[in-house]
Image (cartoon, rainbow, N blue to C red):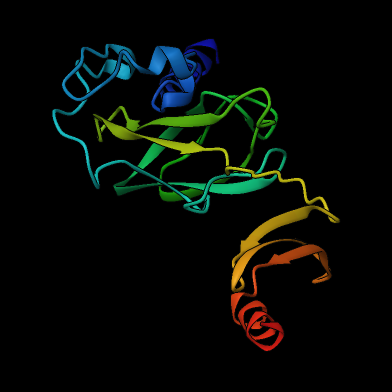
Amino acid sequence: MAMFVFPCVSLLLSLAASYPSSMQCDFACMANYGPGASFGYMGIANVGATSGATCAIATDVPTEGFTGGSSYTITVTSTTALGQKLTCSSGDIGGSTQVNTDSTTTSQTYTWTAPSCDSSSSASFRALCGAGGSIDEMWYAEEVSVSCAATTTGTSTSGDTTTVTHTVTGTSTVTEDDTGTMNGAKTLTCWGIGMAIYSWLF
């Protein structure tokens, strides 16, 4: 009986170590596993030499950026059914900064909660797709970064006075407030009228 149990345990341990979930590696650690990098887990010597469709990250974060505290979907895909490890630099994926699949898949969607924009103005994602055993391959996903949506604040003050200078047959200074009411006095030099009165008197 013991002889039967030990092989079964060994098989289970081997299967458990066949996916990226068997390695403890956070966002910073994942920087060590770019294309062609030495790997060593699951009997895989190196990460695949290229990146692209073999393992890719996509998000539904709008082009204008994320809103702090809101949830978005992060999708990891691969051309072959593989295990996945996804990490984020800020915010969380199901309460953690790293998450794994325990089975092979060509596409998996995760829910990411964005950090407060006060604490982090951006976030990045790194992922690995791979499996040991008969598959025996590991691929790196190009890092994807998103930014916090820009916010604008403004102050509107009513009742401001705009000063406009007009010239009306001489010199005239008029102040106009934002209600359209004209205020002020006009000083006119009426040469035509003055000359007419002078001619009549003399």
As drawn, is 76 to the left or to the right of 196? left
Quadrant containing the C terminus in the rendered view: bottom right
Asked if residue 181 is positioned above or below residue 94 in the image, the reply reads below
As drawn, is 152 to the left or to the right of 62? right
Give me the residue at 61% from left, 79% from top.
195
Give me the residue at 41% from left, 42% from top.
104
Residue toward you, 3 or 172? 172
Q: x, y percentage for residue 200?
A: 68, 88
Would you say residue 6 is visible in this rendering? yes
Quarter residue 189 falls in: bottom right
Quadrant containing the N terminus in the rendered view: top right
Residue toward you, 13 or 135? 135
Asked if residue 13 is positioned above or below residue 117 in the image, the reply reads above
Give me the residue at 21% from left, 12% from top.
38
Q: x, y percentage for residue 174?
A: 73, 62
As drawn, is 125 to the left or to the right of 198? left
Would you say residue 23 is visible in this rendering? no
Residue toward you, 74 or 55? 74
Give me the residue at 19% from left, 25% from top.
35
Asked if residue 89 is positioned above or below residue 178 in the image, the reply reads above
